[in-house]
Image (cartoon, rainbow, N blue to C red):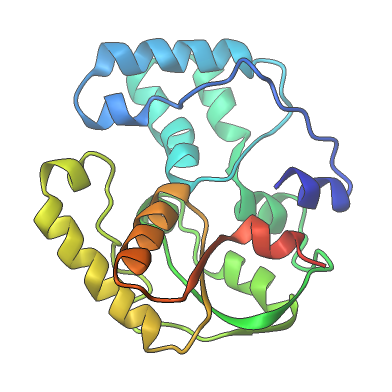
Amino acid sequence: MAEVLERVGCRVEFPEAQTCCGQPAFNSGYRDEARAVAEYSLRVFRDSEYIVVPSGSCASMISHHYAELIDSDEVRAMASRTYEFSQFLTDVLQVEDVGARLSRTVTFHDSCHALRELKIKSGPRRLLANVRELTLNEMEYAEECCGFGGTFSVKFPEVSGGMARTKIESILQTGATAVVGVDGSCLMQLRGALQRDGHKVDVMHLAEVLACR
């Protein structure tokens, strides 16, 4: 992600003190613990002009849910300058062609938080459309959850596994050699399901695709 952002003219800083956004605690009902993480993140990113996140779920946590934990102008200001990676490229920088090249056929998975909370749908596809030699074959159930859902996959493994298998079947029907997404948790779930069943389909973050030249 940093490589792509630098390619299009950004100066990227990575505060090494940063940590989890607090979403696992928040989703599990541990609001005090999540609030402590949010307060810490506020301090770490206080001087950042923009906060660009390679995960739709983490970006959504900061931009949509920190305000539920802390009612302050600083939180609202942080939310207003926090963007998921593809969203930052297309909506802030107004960039849809980063000069990428990748000769393969891919399909795209819409992550739940990116799609439903951040309304990210066409942006990643426009970026993929400008990758030279790449073909995007849409899967039938692109918008369906992969079944990970953070602690959901731990609490309801059988349901989670069934959802993953439905998603994998949809991926395989496209004939793609890779599935692309914008959220590491979804990609981890999909990679695990594909590997367990012995399918030779790669799993790639959108940033990995856009970094190819």
Residue pictured at 39% horizontal, 15% vertical: 70
Q: Judge left or right: residue 156 versus residue 43.
A: left
Q: Judge left or right: residue 67 versus residue 102.
A: left
- Residue 138 vs 21, above or below: the answer is below
Q: Nearer the viewer, residue 157 or 77?
A: 157
Look at the image and tell me whether residue 73 can be seen: no
Q: Judge left or right: residue 10 versus residue 212.
A: right
The total number of labels drawn is 0
Residue 82, image x, y percentages? 59, 36
Q: Judge left or right: residue 7 versus residue 15.
A: right
Q: Nearer the viewer, residue 15 or 164?
A: 164
- Residue 80 vs 171, above or below: the answer is above
Residue pictured at 79% horizontal, 34% vertical: 12
Residue 154, image x, y percentages? 18, 42
Residue 87, image x, y percentages? 61, 53
Residue 86's quadrant in the figure? Answer: bottom right
Look at the image and tell me whether residue 68 can be seen: yes
Residue pictured at 30% horizontal, 62% vertical: 146
Residue 64, image x, y percentages? 42, 36
Q: Quadrant of the C terminus?
A: bottom right
Residue pictured at 29% horizontal, 71% vertical: 197
